[in-house]
Amino acid sequence: MEKTSDPRIPVVSLRGVTKTFPGCVVANEDVDLDLHAGEVHALLGENGAGKSTLMNILSGMVRPDRGELLFEGKRWNPRTPRQAIERGIGMVHQHFMLIPSHSVAENIALGLKGLPLFLPARKIEGRIREFSARYALDVDPNARVWQLSVGERQRVEIIKVLLRGARVLILDEPTSVLTPDEIDRFFCILGRMKNEGKAIVFITHKLGEVMEVADRITILRKGRVTAHMEASEIRRMGTAARHELAFRMVGREVFLSIGRDRVERGEPILSVKDLRVFGDRGRETVNGVSFSVHRGEVFGVVGVAGNGQRELVEAVTGLRPACGGCVSLHESAGTGTECAYIPEDRLHMGAVPDLTVTDNSILTTYRASPFSKGPFLNIPAIREWGASLASRFNIAASDLNAPARQLSGGNLQRLILARELSRNASLLVAEQPTHGLDVGSTEEIWKYLLDQRRSGAVLLVSGDLSEACELSDRIGVMFKGVMTIVEGPFTEEKSREIGLMMTGLR
Amino acid sequence: MGWQAAAAEILRRAFAFGTPLLLATLGEIYAERAGVLNLGVEGMMALGAFSGFFAASRTGNAWLGLAAAALAGAAASLIHAFFSITVRTKIQVVSGIALSFFGLGITGVLGQGLEGKPLETSLPIVHVPFLDRVPILGEALAEQNILVYAGILLAFVLWFFLFRSGWGIAVRSIGEDPAAADSLGVKVELVRYLCVILGGIMAGMGGGYLSIVYRPSWTEGMTGGMGWIVIALTIFSFWNPLVAIGGAYLFGALFYLSYKLQPFFPPELLTMLPYLATIVVLVIVSASGSLRRKMGVPAALGLPYDREGG
Amino acid sequence: MGLYLVKRARNSRPVVIGLSLLSVLFASLVIGVIFLAYRIDPLEAAAVLLKELMSRYGLGEVVWQSIPLILCGGGLLLAFSASFWNIGAEGQLLMGALAATWTALFSGIPGFLRVPALFLLAFGAGALWGIIPAVLKTKFRIPEVITTLMLNYVALNLVLYLIHGPWKGEKVYGFAYTDTFPASAWLPVIGPTRIHWPTLALGLALLFAVDLILKRTRLGYEIKVVSRSLDAGRYAKISYFRTIFLVMVVSGGMAGLAGAGEVAGVHHLLRHPDQVSLGYGYTAIVVAWLARGNPYAIVASSVLMGMILVAGDVIQVSYGFPSSLVKVFTGLILFFLIAGDLLITYRVAWKGRDC
């Protein structure tokens, strides 16, 4: 159905929605969004763009600071998830909210109104089968959730919302966990729901898929809407415009440039051969990756989140076992085989927010001298270290003995960065090192990363393509667990190519 | 005594002694299924025993005594619920232990002077016709106090409610994944409160049974550590009311046997078994992934729930 | 906008101490009310108590009852700081008593070695009893609350079995107990009191050790990290298993020593667990909680609980009031502590525009 100039009132609208979280993190800024019945509206954006927060607002989990929601044109203020559910907002989360030990019917019946008090599961069986048939979902009400495949679980989540009379379905990265077969089937189901007049929000980062099913597209970046168009427009676009769109999603607005001096490329410090790694759901997320990182070079790993980068990094840093292939860190003159690691999750992994800044400054280095001697800690040396890190790296902390949770996001990042950079390790693995930082800090950190090349090598994992292009000597593009290596230098043209590789259009 | 008669006698005693265990365990099963660990069972049972005895002896009405016992347990559990659910005490253990201390202590204080005085009234003994024709099991069940039958009945009812009703689904879901339940609009806190209070009522009744039926009198410390056995039994029954029936009577039989076989076999080795068995059972269940899912510890047990992600 | 709870920046020392003192104060007030209800003048009772507690005999009683509390409390403090909720101090204590008894009566170790040996073996037995839940937690994810609790009763029954069975003493009047220990296994006491000072010395030394561990060692640092964030612990390549294992060796071992102290220093034989442990293992939980993470405060809270225990006996003798009042007091202190916890960990804040 063509809906290019449809004057119908959208089922749900967001107008000027803004949400800021404590710590001055702006999740959404002035967002407008319209959802029409019988339409698939794709919401694109990289990680941290604000998609999840926006959907949490829509589903009643979070209240916006400013702006309003409209339901069928009238102002609407969902205060609890239940209110949103009652209006017909159904959210299918990326991380399923199912109870593995319960049956499908029990999961669906949970909190469902209008069911008899006794034997509700049996009552609902019939309805489940009915919906199952109508939308080609093929779900067995009596199966236990833990026995189901990921695709089947997703279908259970879909029925869960459909049975609650959902008129608006929010699908959060639905295809990121599916195999190609399951994806085809999923699109089928999507089509059926469209025909039934449901308004569907499809959150994704895969532009290719969006082209297949979306009617409308909105792109979010850093909490703001940066593009909005009808899919038919895009289909009429030429290749160049399409590439522009892809780049707009993964690239950066402001282009920083930094002088890179030449550094001799030396012996290999990290060798990865045929690496295979299982992800959390038991599927292979890294499918035979091989590359090496040499002294004096920055090796960038790019790719949209969920294509295996996390598992790759965890295998390299030793936090996750590989199921095939091997990772070897080579002895490097003067620095041994240490590997410093700046994790993406600063708050939960890279630091312990309840411990002091000083304590956090030795999280990965406390075992070595001068911080310990035998089983004992050298407290004065640790204190000195903490202070020196803070001053050298401009970490604004009023009190080094206050818990690290008091640091602003940027300062916490700097702390972790400072700690890992100062390790003089032969390999520095940096995951999203400048994520969420302002231009000034970003530049600073870029300088440090480049500096690291002199004594070792850097494995940079970044979701920001232009950053990777600026800093890296070579780039490995991860897509569906497979890495394609591209040699630098990275011209504008090359980076656009890479952008396409990231979004699967190449 | 022929072995049949002996077996029947063992069972008869098992039913009698296992009943307070069963009653309190049924309540604790609900609380733990909803994710709240309540170590205050010992205190609640003591409070129930004392209040039951006190009310029954003052009013001359055993039923009023039982009601008082249930009420006392409920009131005590409310305190624990408050600390565990609303205050979200980091470890529910502390609140439960405080409750046990307090319950045991205050009943000792209040009960001074009342010790050993026999209770005039008690709850009626029921005689089920025809049942005594059924060998062993029937003989044992033919004539018991009404609370014994109530216990079995309650177990069935509570099982049905837990596994075959909408509320039961909610309770069990909250204990596994409160966030999932919350996202579907289930009132996590309210349900938890209700489950903990049910636990208090049942524990109180269990205590009341002790002082009104089993040993119609009050003695300080008459619960004799039963509260801790209940905690073991809850786990041993895989948090399933039907299994709890078997478990409670098994433990009851064990205690009776340990007493009866004293000349032949050290009783302590038998009374040790429930605790050891609980650990062994837990290890077996936790070691296997699929068993753990089906019968293991409720995933969110002991963890307070905070919507903001606490 | 609105009122909501914000985690406090840091727990200020005076507030924390104040909370502990206030909890005790409020609990005392409630006890006073109970006295009034039973027509006992609370002030008079307080005077009597003070007189008794301050007497030479009274002080002696307080101190010897504090010894096991110091040991168990210190061990629990260590476990709690690792977020390992060890409620099995009672069982670990009994296992220590068991090991000490074996050493004293049946081991055949030469006389002059007996005392060090019984302490050593008691530590080992307690440590073993602590390691079991540690392994079960780290390898099977079984909540330690359950396993430590269950092991308490296994230990209890084990002791009962032994004193009624294979270890039954030759001269038994009424209750069951083992033979009296030979003199070489008796701990020396201070003067006419029952204060077995070697155990006390060990307790104080170990408190010092716990403080050292927590503040100045790598293990202490690892405990700090692992108890707050498992992810960060993984990132820092800290072995959760090793950390908890070591913690429980010490925690269980200290409780074991307490058990040794009781049988070798006070009773000189092994008797019914209720009379040996007197619930020290559970009372130690309150002791540890009151101390709020400071090992040296354990001394104060142990002495306080010791005073309460002795006070209970005094009240019973002077007023015929059941000693279960002590349990009431203990429970109340704990309740007030966790109620107050809410105040110190969080403060009410008004959420405004702060960006």
Image (spheres, grey):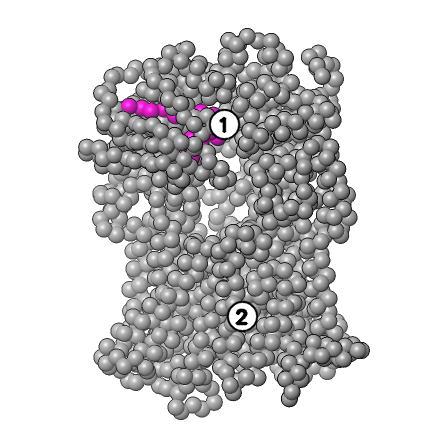
CA gap, disc 2 and disc 1? 52 Å
* Secondary structure beneath label 1: loop
Q: Tell me, yes or no, if residue C119 can be seen here.
A: yes
Q: Give the residue at mark 1.
A: A47
Q: Percent from the top left, x then y, of residue B242?
A: 66, 63
Label 1 CA crowd tier, 10 Å (few <14, some 14–19, many 20+): some
Circles 2 and 1 on the same chain: no
> What subunit carries mark 2?
B
Identity of the residue drawn at 58% across and 46% down: A146
Q: Nearer the viewer, residue A479 or C291?
A: A479
Q: Indicate the quadrant where residue B249 lies.
A: bottom right
A258 is higher (above) or lower (below) than A362: above
Q: Tell me, yes or no, if residue A76 can be seen here.
A: no
C17 is higher (above) or lower (below) than A462: below
Q: Give the residue at mark 2.
A: B274
Left of A416 or right of it: where is B157?
right
Q: Percent from the top left, x then y, of residue A208?
A: 55, 20
Identity of the residue drawn at 61% across and 11% down: A233
Q: Nearer the viewer, residue B56 or A461?
A: A461
Numbered range of the magenta stretch:
A297-313
